Amino acid sequence: MRATWGGTGSVEDASRAFGFSRAKGYDLVRRGEFPCRVLRIGRSTRVVTASLLRVLDSGQPEYGGTCGTHPAPA
């Protein structure tokens, strides 16, 4: 996965890695409950690859499960 994603990946791909649907993934992002770090870049939403891999490896959500979305720096 890391070889094809670079620094970030899509919510769709990350959702598939966690075993839930695209719709469920975007719902979790919207509620601030996605299990790993998510970035909003303009109108795009991206999942941080390193965060995704850590969560998949440990089985524990990052940021106490309240990672949510983090706005891009101004």
Image (cartoon, rainbow, N blue to C red):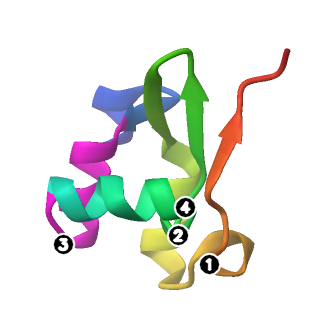
Identify the residue position indicated by label 3 in the image: 19
Q: Amino acid at mark 1?
A: Gly
In the image, farthest residue toward the right: 74
Q: CA distance from mark 3 to mark 4?
A: 14 Å
CB under 8 Å between discs 4 and 1: no
CB under 8 Å between discs 2 and 1: yes
Residue occupying image coordinates x 32% and y 52%: 26
Name the element at disc 4. Answer: loop
Residue occupying image coordinates x 70% and y 42%: 70
Identify the residue position indicated by label 1 in the image: 65
Magenta residues span 10-21
Q: CA distance from mark 4 to mark 1?
A: 8 Å
* Neighbours of disc 2 within 10 Å: few (<14), some (14-19), many (20+): many
Residue 33: give its label: 2
Name the element at disc 3. Answer: loop
Q: Amino acid at mark 3?
A: Gly
Q: What secondary structure prevails in the magenta region?
A: helix
